Image: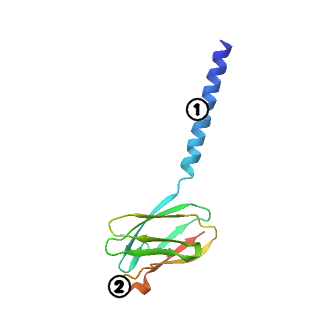
Amino acid sequence: MESQRRRALAVGAAMIAGAALGMRVAAQQPRVIAVVARKFVFLPNEIRVKKGETVTLELSAPEVVMGMNIPDFKVRADIIPGTVSKLTFTPDKAGTFPFLCDIFCGDGHEGMSGTLIVT
C-alpha cells in the first residue's frame, strides 16, 4: 500500500511539473504581428512591442517583391507576393526605431517606412 501511495504521489508530482513546464513553454512563444507591405506603405506602419519580448512579424506583399529592414536591430527579410515571410527578433533596447522597405518597389519607394516603438 505504501509503495502504491508513493507511486501515486510521484505520478501526481510529475504531472504538475509537466503542466508547469507546458505553461512556461507556451509563455515563451513569440507574439505574432501581421504586417502587409503595399505600395507604398506598411500596414500597420507603427508597431509597438516591449523590450525583451520576442515577436514574429508575419510579412506579406500582395503586389510586388518588397523588403522589411529594421536596421537598429540588424534584422531584415524579403517579402515575396503569395508567401508569408517570418521575421523573429527580441528587441534589447527601448526607444523609437524606423523600419523601411529596402527593395525598390516603384515610384514612392523612398517614403515607404514605419516606426517600431519599444517600451
Q: Quadrant of the N terminus?
A: top right
Q: Which residue appears at 60% of the width and 34% of the height?
A: 16
Total labels drawn: 2
Q: Nearer the viewer, residue 115 or 85?
A: 85
Q: Secondary structure at mark 2?
A: loop
Amino acid found under the numbered disc labelled 2: Gly
Q: Nearer the viewer, residue 102 or 39?
A: 102
The x and y percentages for residue 54 are 56, 60
42 left or right of 49 in image: left
In the rendered image of this protein, does residue 32 appear above or below residue 35? above
Measure the alpha-carbon separation of dots 1 and 2.
57 Å
The x and y percentages for residue 79 are 40, 70
Within-10-Å neighbours for mark 1: few <14, some 14–19, many 20+: few
Q: Which residue appears at 63% of the width and 71% of the height?
A: 94
The x and y percentages for residue 3 are 67, 16
Q: Secondary structure at mark 1?
A: helix
**Residue that carries the numbered disc 2 in the rendered image:** 106
In the rendered image of this protein, does residue 103 appear above or below residue 34? below
Amino acid found under the numbered disc labelled 1: Met
**Residue that carries the numbered disc 1 in the rendered image:** 15
Q: Nearer the viewer, mark 1 or mark 2?
A: 2
Quadrant for residue 105, please give it: bottom left
The x and y percentages for residue 19 are 57, 38
Query: In terms of sequence position, does the residue under pointer 1 or pointer 2 come before the other?
Result: 1
Within-10-Å neighbours for mark 2: few <14, some 14–19, many 20+: few
